Amino acid sequence: DTSGIPHRPGRLPVIGDLIGANPRTPLQDTVRIGKRLGPIFTRKVFGFEIVLVGGVDLVTELNDETKFGKHVGLGVENLRALGGDGLFTAHTHEPNWRLAHDILQPAFSAEAMRRYHPIMLDVARELVAAWDAASGPVDVSADMTRLTLETIGRAGFGYRFGSFERPEPHPFVTAMIRALRYAQLQNVKLPFVRRAFAGTPEQNRADIAVMTDLVDEVIAERRGSGEESRDLLGLMLTEGHPMTGERLDPVNIRNQAITFVVAGHETTSGALSFALYYLTRHPELLAKARAEVDAVWGGREPAFADVAKLRYVRRVLDEAMRLWPTAPGYSREAREDVVLGGKYRMRKGDWVVVPLPLVHRDPAAWGDDPEAFDPDRFEPAAVRKRPAQAYKPFGTGERACIGRQFALHEAVLALGVVLQRYDFDIDPAYELKIVESLTLKPSGFTLRPRVRLRTS
Ligand code: HEM
């Protein structure tokens, strides 16, 4: 029963709260509306009502794993057309979730990060080569997507997308972006609106085929080569479960491969782009971050252990992901009948959406100027004063992001490398514009990099 939960005034029959809503920016609309309506509210679009919870106190309850778990719903259920029972889209009760989680965990250990470091550094060198050669402004989100796609391709699968050699995105990326949009828009119930924004089912089938064909090719090549590697693909093809010895089946391996390429690059790319956006708009913070890189790395390229030493650069990324968590939400489902916040009755199986940009702006946890970009919010003393559940860019509980350490090592490394090497001319007229697909990214954000320091 959602009758006691606030929603926007003027809700209409059939189309609901659609006035003023834009199918291209559902998340940004939600943030705007949620800031006015408070910690819990509903939105109704085309007969489809969802409850959204952005207040830290209520989210703290929702994140209690004994009472709630991940809900695969709304956008995520539709993504099963791409990811099947891969880790991100699997229901927790599907046996393949636990099996794959346990088999793949070693691919995200500290030891594994040490193996990925030289690969990540190599890709950062390719970004540097591209930016050194650029004669004008570069599209930051596009280049960060090249970097992160190349990194997950090589570190996870030994596959080169060749992103920096291509003027346009790799066909996998074009297909992926369209397929993600198609999946997301399946929730829009009016066919003509859906078709206008999502494209045709034929196009969608072709896009999914582009993705599965590439993944099948990479898997076949690895199987054929007899090469042994402890990257993601190597673990999936050769390892059994640590306790039972059970192996992943070929269909699941394909699902995981697509899942990891998608989950493993869009989000990290957006985080890097937002971080560069905020730094270049706050020269004093950029100077502070760069001073740290110069002090800790000197004029050298970073060794593995040098990356985690960039504490301030890490805080810049944390703060960028506070304002714009690039995976902007998750859903929670009641394991039993519960009363949320002592007030809202939920039956077993009922679910709500947690829009992270609202959690990350709740004044109760973040003070009265939550829109201000301030990396010092992540100084240890400040973090200790905040409720533990106030910051959740990597999700929560057993279904939280398995790639967190991978993303953070990659992002701190790449941000360190570009701050060390470049000064930036900005376009002063640019105003932050955010594109929404499954993830968030700045759109049309360019910088002109000028070499300030050549590394040895
Ligand atoms: C899950 C965020 C990078 C792989 C998640 C979830 C979030 C998230 C919020 C939970 C979603 C939910 O509860 O429905 C991010 C962010 C990243 C990032 C913000 C970068 C800044 C990565 C990378 C990889 C990855 C680099 C792989 C190399 C996954 C997978 C899951 C996941 C496989 C599903 C885990 C499971 O349910 O068992 N991520 N992620 N992510 N992420 Fe990430």
Image (cartoon, rainbow, N blue to C red):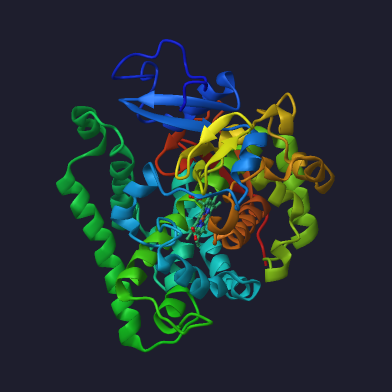
* Residue at image point 54% right, 24% down: 34
Point out residue 211 in the picture as x, y percentages from the top left corner.
28, 60
| Front in this rendered view, residue 306 or 48 | 48
Question: Which residue occupies the foreground of this view, 58 or 251?
Answer: 58
Answer whether residue 259 is visible to the viewer in this image.
Answer: yes
48 to the left or right of 428: left
Extreme residue toward the top, this view: 10
Report the side of 334 relative to 197 (left or right).
Answer: right
Position of 172 with respect to 160 (left or right) is left
- What percent of the width, then of the height, locates residue 144? 49, 51
Whether residue 429 is visible to the viewer of this picture, yes or no, is no
Q: Quadrant of the C terminus?
A: bottom right
Residue 440, given in percent of the width and then of the height, sits at 47, 40
300 to 134, vertically: above or below: below
Query: Which residue is painted at 46% across and 72% down in the image?
Result: 99
Which residue is painted at 41% across and 10% down in the image?
Answer: 10
Above or below, 361 relative to 160: above
User: Residue 431: x, y in percent?
Assistant: 52, 26
In this rendering, position of residue 38 left or right of residue 95: right
Q: How many marks?
A: 0
